[in-house]
Structures are given as structure tokens and as C-alpha cells.
Amino acid sequence: MERHGLSDIQLWKDFKGGDNESLAYIYSINSKRLYWYGLSFTSDYLLVEDAIQDLFSELILSRKRLSDTNNIQFYLLKSFKRILKRKISREKRVQLYDVQMKGDFEVTHSIEYFIIHEEDSYQQVRSLHEAIRSLTSRQKEAIYLKFSEGLGYDETAEIMDMTVESCRNLIWKAIRFLKNSLLQNQV
């Protein structure tokens, strides 16, 4: 059965109903995205792979009890972050500063790729990399979720355990900082 044209609501409903083709499709579409997101928190790729396996194992074991969703990507990112945070904490591979995961979040693709294609100058690209490195970990994560993963402010805020207004402000300040950094380097 073709899965590509199904809405997230129907695909999730089919998965919850026991359709393993839907599960395979959900995994194939989202596993690489989860992998790269996980590597933004830790360089331990085995831990990230374990977290992905745990996520899908939990989904399979509890599929009949899962809540409905109209955005599978959001559901998986939020669940995956929770599992990865628990694994990192258990493994003590990354120091946690408080209840929230505040490890160095590094965006190494997508946002840079998008901006690079907007600007041809090598100097601007180098300036952008420097500016991104100057962002806080929270700003980097918010920018990644919003622009690389295409999540809305509400979904980004929920994943990051903050209010939507705080999320908007965080992203706005990060973008303003990046723009100002690029403008200063053009002069």
C-alpha cells in the first residue's frame, strides 16, 4: 500500500492499528532526521542510535495506547529528545546543568546550508559560521528546530520546555544577532 500520500493523522492511525508498513514508512522518513538531531546533543553516535531504537521500540510496545497526532515529526522529535536526555543523564556522558538538557547544541547543517545558498560570498559564509558559534545553546536549538526541522513556534517551544512567547523572542533575538553580525562584517 502506498504511504506517501497519506496525511499524518491517517498514517498514525494505521500504525496504531497494527499496520507495520506504516511503521516502516514512519521510520524511513524520520530516522535520519532524528539521528542528526541527536548528534546535535552528543557526539556519541551509538547512544543516539540506541535512543532511536528505544523510541521505536516504545512506540511499537505501546502503539494501542498512544495519543493521536496530526504531526508525526513533532511527536517523534519530542519523544526522542526525552529518551535521549534520559540516556545521556544515565550514561553521564554529558554534564546536565539543570533539569533541562543544556549541552552544547551545535547546528552543523541545514541552517548554514540555507543561508550559504542565499549568499555567494565566502566572507559572508565565514562570518555566519562565527556568528552561529556565538549563539547560546538554546538559540542554536531553537533555530535548528524552527528552520531546519520546519516546526512551528508552539511545537519548538514545547520541545524546549518554554512558552511560545519566550520561544518567539529567543528566535527573534538569535536572528537579529545573526543579521547584525553579517552586516557588521560587510562594512
Image: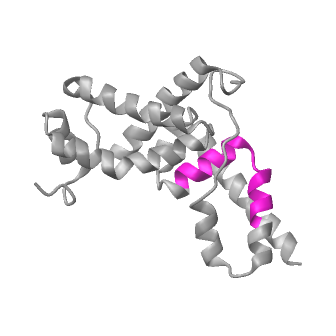
Nearer to us in this view, 64 or 162: 64
Above or below, 155 relative to 16: below
User: Is most of the magenta stretch helix, strand or loop?
Assistant: helix
Outermost residue, front direction? 46
In the rendered image, the vertical position of residue 113 relative to residue 13, given as above or below: below
Please report the bounds of the magenta region as a residue range.
128-146
Say which quadrant the N terminus sits in: bottom left
Residue 98 lies left or right of residue 31; in this view the side is right
Q: Quadrant of the C terminus?
A: bottom right
Q: Position of residue 91 (x, y in %)?
A: 60, 20
Residue lying at 47% horizontally and 27% vertically, measured from the top left: 83
Q: Is residue 164 above or below residue 67?
A: below
Report the residue at 38% width, 32% height from top: 53
**Where in the figure is residue 137, as x and y percent of width and height?**
70, 42
Q: Quadrant of residue 13?
A: top left
The residue depicted at 58 percent of the width and 34 percent of the height is 162
The quarter of the displayed image where residue 147 is located? bottom right
Do we see residue 164 in this rendering? Answer: no
Whether residue 46 is visible, yes or no, is: yes
Q: Is residue 1 left or right of residue 184?
A: left
Q: Nearer the viewer, residue 63 or 161?
A: 63
**Residue in front for this viewpoint, 21 or 81:** 21
Query: Residue 8, how many percent across, how many down?
Result: 25, 49
